[in-house]
Image (spheres, helix red, strand yellow):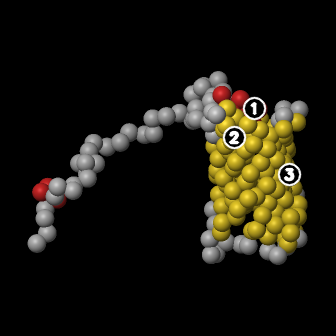
Amino acid sequence: MVTPVSENPLQPPWLNAPPVEEYPFEESHDLRVGPKLHPALDALLPYIGLWRGRGKGGFPTIEDFDYAQEIRISHDGRPFLHYESRAWILDEQSKPVRPAGREVGWWRPVLVDGRATDELEALLTTPSGVMELHLGKRTGTQVEFATDVVIRTPTAKEVTGGHRLFGIVEGALLYAQEMAAMGHGLSPHLSARLVRVGG
């Protein structure tokens, strides 16, 4: 005999609870609004914002391509940054052709006794089935990451490693990315210059 839910002593307390409102905590890429920046992120403050620009891509297994990109780096008052990137392929007239790479993840300063060091950790995930754990270091306004671990779904392409260099140069966000994949060692893959459009 099945016990009615109303008589079940293990009935979860949320079963008949009222509806939940939207997420109540603000996240911002604009330091003029939203939560106060966590002190552990002070050295990464120049990266927080909405960035947009152009880049060049390539790899030994594909033809070179031009792309546009938007990167949003935001915070919610805790000691990590939310990183989101989306890119799209451009044709010879700089017109959008199709969506390209997307990533979401987090940059986290390594804390010792509650204080940020120059060491960083980053978790980045793509919709193509690749998740990378990067370890890195900040030097001034430059951030350098190298892959520590790559996890792939069974259907993802064979990515085995990566290296990324970010910098704030004359107010712009510049980066270069190398990738090891498809039987090739670390090779240049992406490079771009993005300007701040928000934040």
Amino acid type at image mark 3? Ala
Amino acid type at image mark 1? Ala
Secondary structure under tag 1 reads: helix
Amino acid type at image mark 2? Pro
Q: Percent position (x, y) of residue 134?
A: 73, 54
The Cα–Cα distance between marks 3 and 1, rounded to whole angstroms, is 21 Å
The Cα–Cα distance between marks 3 and 2, rounded to whole angstroms, is 21 Å
User: Quarter holding the N terminus?
Assistant: bottom left
The residue drawn where x is 80% and y is 40% is 138
In which image quadrant can residue 124 be found? bottom right
Furthest-front residue in view?
A: 113
Is the residue under label 1 in contact with that under label 2 (CB below 8 Å)? yes
The residue drawn where x is 63% and y is 62% is 127
The Cα–Cα distance between marks 2 and 1, rounded to whole angstroms, is 9 Å
Which disc, if any, is residue 176?
3
Q: Percent position (x, y) of residue 16?
A: 23, 48
Quick one: label 2, few (<14), some, or many (20+) residues within 10 Å? many
Furthest-top residue in view?
A: 32
Is the residue under label 1 in contact with that under label 3 (CB below 8 Å)? no
